[in-house]
Image (cartoon, rainbow, N blue to C red):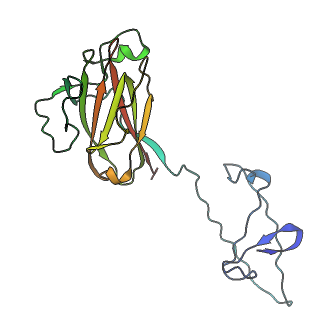
Amino acid sequence: VTTLTNGNLLLNADGGPGGVGVQLTVPRLDGFTDGVLSAEESVDVPFAICLQEQSPFSFFVDVLGVISTPATQTQVLLPYLSPGYRFLVVPFGEGVGFEQPDFDDSHFEIGDAAFGTGGFCPLDSTVQTLWPLETDLLLRQTFLLPTNASTVKVAVAIDNDVEVFMNGQDISGGVQVHEGCAERESFVFSVPESLLVFGGENLLAVRARDRGGISYVDVEIRADIPPF
């Protein structure tokens, strides 16, 4: 960076003095204080050109404008209250292996989320499929993951406990214990990219456990997607 008159800056592409390929660092002033020029905003940028000899020359300026958009946008791939889960009610701990993609779930029933008994908690009115008390509920659901997705997360509303799998692998660190009424975002689990099939079908599997009182479980999957 070469400092010119009045604090102006002229930056050449190769770090040398001004010449072919010069890039000008624009100071944040006037309507550019936030680093973004919005509609009807403008900024005056005075700078000096220093010549070693008096000679006619031509000077051209190219300005590249870029519309400011978020680098990514969060998109819901599997929303809360989704239909079409394959499910099975079992005694505590039974159904080992149900989370594997090649597991035969043809004997599972089909039901819509949320699953539970209903009750006095705020989310209980959203129950669509009965889940009996003091049992484990096994859930399986597939979803498509865009090729350009990133930061995939699974959010859970649960009463009481939950274990979450993606493509057969535990992403919750075992059974996570939860007390009290179910709330959305009770747990949010990040999914390692190494477990995911980008541009294809993925399997979400959930073991939910009720220990009495009221049962409830529902799940949402979201990911960051570039806007274009």
- Image-quadrant location for residue 169: top left
In depth, the one of 196 and 174 nearer the eye is 174
Q: Position of residue 40 (x, y in %)?
A: 70, 49
Would you say 80 lies left or right of 95 here? right
Q: Residue furthest top?
A: 120
Q: Where in the figure is residue 191, as x and y percent of width and height?
A: 38, 45
Q: Quick one: which residue is furthest to the right in this view?
A: 6
Q: Residue 128, percent across and down? A: 28, 18
Q: Which of 43 and 121 is in front in this view?
A: 121
- Hey, which quadrant is residue 57 in on the image? bottom right
* In-front residue for pair 17/41: 17
- At 25% from the left and 36% from the top, the residue drawn is 141
Residue shown at the point (88%, 72%) measured from the top left:
5
Residue visible at 20% across and 23% down?
89
Q: Is 218 situated above or below 213?
A: below
Q: How many marks?
A: 0
Q: Which residue is drawn at 43% across and 14% down?
A: 122
Up/down of 176 relative to 34, above or below: above
What x and y, as percent, mark residue 148? 39, 54
Is residue 63 positioned above or below 200 on the image? below
Q: Is 219 placed left or right of 34 in the picture?
A: left
In which quadrant of the rendered image does the N terminus lie?
Answer: bottom right
